């Protein structure tokens, strides 16, 4: 009960260098001064199992202060590393189901403690699913074994009348999550297929016991006293698990029906529909939760905080049904004839300067302070008084024309470079701006406060044509990807602590890229990077878009339809959706596994796209001056904002800019 696990990681935040560890023999180590054995699980992780809490404390205090805090939105402090799961949950501002699973000790690396997600829906029979009917949703205040009244009575009587010596009374004879349960759900996906066969004498289960349909699985866990299975995370993000793509011979049920692909509810026409609708319903309030082996709460789950509530609102199409009376809250008119081509709206309240940073084609940038005063009507914290305040303040140096030289990037760029939104990246704290396109094949870092050049980064053999930044973590660490005319991409590490490319301030003049990404045959024109998924997706002047890992491995090519040959814009969500805009206004939405989910063609010459973080909604803008919002799964149009008097160059969340 005192054991804990510490991880050695080669992830975003770098390595833990254990000078105390010395090799004894292959895959087995000793931690000096403690005499504890260390087992090498794989090439990137080491697991420690300690006998008591005192030893855990000694080891934690001998290691760097990396700890577990970063994963949970908490400081990188040793006291956080020593916190119990319940203390982590109470302290962390983060609130989502994977967080609960992680601090409860669940892991994708342990089939017996695999992450658990709940059944949320109860209606798997209707042709159409009405999400406004309460009866279509499961009562989350009860465990799965107590949802059916008769089974709840049976379980209660079993507990009250239990008399067997040596075994404490219990309601259910099996757990809601076991290794067998996980393998049952994932039977059609490797390596789970092999795991299942190895555990069952190289045979598949009886067809009538196999997972063959969503509705059938739900009925079983309501009626069968031995079946209290909850779901796993893959039900909410992996449509491939419902398809027998490998053609396994899974047999026939007693009624003669062959077991192959999973039978979906009538309201889901394809696996992607089922996963998408399931994901929408996780936004449902979780009222009660407990995990095995660590129970996080003995009281009801706390209500979702107002901050979290606000985070979900902008991702819902419902936000477009009740627009504010003023479609345009305010207009910023910059004293420049050069169009604004890049916008980065980093407006979180904890930032020292919440702002929308704008950059023009003449490389004049502005740091426009954001006041966090405008919210959605009816949202927590919204008031009529706030509605009369302007949300954004123009950069005073630009407004007064007194410090324009301080805001102008005058270094010469290659004359053949067309300045566009891909030429710039702004760090998450608004303090630095990265610019590419220079004749010397570099990209450069400038301070937004002073306007001064702080770093020049070399690595490519030709002019750098595009830049992209991943999402940032605590401290501002992130990945930067640069694409070039040399047909390669380089992955760099941005240190939020030192404000440089690379993690060594003593060697900032010659930082080394983390990975070199190859595979394109022509100039790279667009790129997007997602640290959470560990992926880089890029497009060249001609040819398919490529998907690389952040370690440089080429995973696959995203082959568009016949006329989708020249990608121009890419936007990737943290959920694995990838929207690509090709020339002549052609759009494709791909899954992270390369499946073409939807396509459309619009007449507009699109210049800017933005995909919501959950991958549900797409914002586009172009030369016609119109901002449009689409449902990404099928490109159904949700909303059209009033047209501008010039083309749209750069949308960012709720902020868009005119081209003039």
Image (cartoon, rainbow, N blue to C red):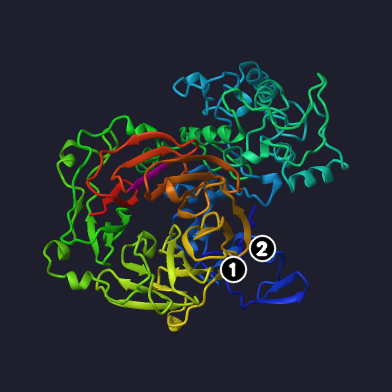
The relative height of residue 568 versus residue 21 in the rendered view (above or below) is above
Q: Is residue 603 magenta?
A: no
Q: Is residue 185 left or right of residue 11?
A: right
Crowding near the residue tagged with mark 2, few <14, some 14–19, many ≥20 C-alpha atoms within 10 Å: some
Q: Quadrant of residue 626?
A: top left
The relative height of residue 491 versus residue 311 in the rendered view (above or below) is below
Crowding near the residue tagged with mark 1, few <14, some 14–19, many ≥20 C-alpha atoms within 10 Å: some
Tell me the distance, in whole angstroms, between the alpha carbons under discs 2 and 1.
10 Å
Question: Is residue 156 at least partly visible in the picture?
Answer: yes
Looking at the rendered structure, the secondary structure element under dot 2 is strand
Question: Is residue 309 at least partly visible in the picture?
Answer: no
What residue range appears in magenta? 618-622
**What percent of the width, then of the height, locates residue 406?**
21, 73
Considering the whole magenta stretch, tell me its main secondary structure.
strand
Q: Is residue 621 magenta?
A: yes
Q: Is residue 274 left or right of residue 360?
A: right
**Residue pictured at 27% horizontal, 51% vertical:** 657
Q: Is residue 235 left or right of residue 386?
A: right
Number of the label disc, if any, that sits on residue 59: 1
Number of the label disc, if any, that sits on residue 48: 2
**Residue pictured at 52% horizontal, 32% vertical:** 277
- Quadrant of the rendering where the C terminus is positioned: bottom left
Label located before the other in sequence (2 or 1): 2
**What percent of the width, then of the height, locates residue 207?**
81, 28
Q: Is residue 245 left or right of residue 398?
A: right
**What percent of the width, then of the height, locates residue 585?**
42, 46
Number of the label disc, if any, that sits on residue 46: none
**Discs 2/1, front:** 2
The relative height of residue 556 versus residue 476 in the rendered view (above or below) is above
**Residue pictured at 69% horizontal, 37% vertical:** 243
């Amino acid at each position: 009960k005192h054991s804990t696990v510490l991880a050695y990681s080669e992830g975003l935040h770098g390595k833990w260098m254990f000078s105390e560890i010395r090799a004894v023999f292959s895959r087995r180590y000793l931690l000096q001064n403690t005499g504890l054995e260390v087992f090498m699980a794989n090439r990137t992780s080491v697991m420690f199992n300690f006998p008591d809490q005192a030893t855990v404390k000694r080891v934690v205090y001998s290691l760097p202060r990396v700890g577990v805090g970063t994963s949970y939105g908490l400081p990188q402090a040793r006291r956080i590393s020593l916190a119990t799961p319940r203390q982590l949950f109470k302290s962390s501002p983060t609130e989502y189901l994977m967080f609960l699973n992680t601090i409860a000790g669940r892991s994708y690396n342990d089939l017996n403690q695999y992450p658990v997600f709940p059944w949320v829906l109860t209606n798997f029979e209707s042709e159409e699913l009405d999400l406004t009917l309460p009866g279509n949703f499961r009562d989350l205040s009860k465990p799965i074994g107590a949802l059916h009244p008769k089974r709840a009575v049976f379980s209660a009587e079993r507990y009250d009348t239990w008399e067997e010596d040596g075994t404490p009374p219990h309601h259910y004879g099996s757990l809601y999550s076991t290794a067998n349960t996980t393998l049952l759900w994932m039977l059609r996906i490797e390596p789970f297929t092999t795991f299942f066969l190895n555990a069952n004498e190289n045979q598949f289960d009886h067809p009538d016991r196999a997972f063959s349909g969503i509705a059938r699985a739900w009925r079983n866990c309501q009626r069968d006293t031995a079946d209290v299975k909850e779901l796993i995370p893959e039900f909410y993000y992996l449509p491939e698990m419902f398809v027998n793509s490998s053609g396994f011979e899974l047999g026939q049920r007693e009624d003669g029906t062959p077991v192959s692909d999973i039978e979906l509810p009538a309201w889901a026409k394809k696996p992607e529909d089922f996963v998408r609708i399931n994901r929408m319903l996780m936004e449902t309030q979780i009222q009660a939760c407990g995990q095995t082996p660590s129970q996080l709460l003995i009281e009801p789950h706390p209500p979702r905080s107002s901050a979290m509530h606000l985070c979900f609102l902008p991702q819902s199409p419902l936000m477009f049904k009740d627009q504010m009376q003023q479609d345009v809250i305010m207009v910023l008119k910059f004293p420049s004839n050069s169009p604004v081509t890049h916008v980065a709206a980093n407006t979180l309240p904890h930032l020292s300067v919440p702002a929308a940073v704008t950059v023009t084609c003449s490389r004049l940038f502005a740091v426009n302070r954001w006041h966090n005063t405008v919210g959605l009507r009816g949202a927590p914290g919204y008031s009529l008084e706030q509605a009369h305040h302007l949300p954004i303040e123009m950069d005073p140096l630009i407004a007064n024309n007194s410090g324009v030289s301080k805001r102008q990037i005058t270094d010469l760029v290659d004359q053949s470079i067309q300045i566009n939104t891909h030429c710039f990246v702004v760090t998450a704290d608004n303090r630095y701006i990265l610019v590419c396109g220079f004749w010397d094949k570099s990209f450069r870092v400038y301070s937004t406060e002073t306007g001064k050049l702080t770093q020049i980064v070399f690595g490519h053999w030709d002019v750098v044509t595009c830049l992209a930044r991943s999402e940032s973590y605590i401290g501002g660490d992130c990945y930067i990807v640069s694409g070039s005319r040399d047909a390669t991409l380089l992955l760099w590490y941005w240190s939020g602590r030192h404000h440089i490319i690379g993690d060594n301030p003593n060697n900032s003049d010659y930082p080394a890229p983390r990975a070199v990404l190859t595979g394109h045959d022509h100039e790279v024109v667009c790129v997007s990077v997602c640290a959470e998924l560990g992926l880089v997706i890029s497009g060249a002047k001609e040819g398919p878009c490529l998907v690389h890992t952040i370690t440089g491995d080429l995973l696959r090519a995203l082959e568009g339809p016949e006329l989708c040959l020249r990608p121009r814009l890419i936007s990737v969500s943290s959920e694995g959706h990838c929207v690509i805009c090709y020339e002549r206004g052609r759009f494709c939405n791909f899954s992270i596994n390369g499946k073409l989910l939807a396509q459309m063609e619009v007449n507009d010459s699109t210049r800017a796209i933005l995909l919501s973080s959950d991958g549900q909604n797409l914002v586009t803008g172009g030369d016609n001056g119109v901002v449009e919002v689409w449902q990404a799964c099928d490109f159904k149009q949700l909303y059209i904002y009033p047209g501008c008097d010039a083309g749209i160059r750069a949308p960012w969340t709720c902020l868009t800019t005119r081209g003039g």
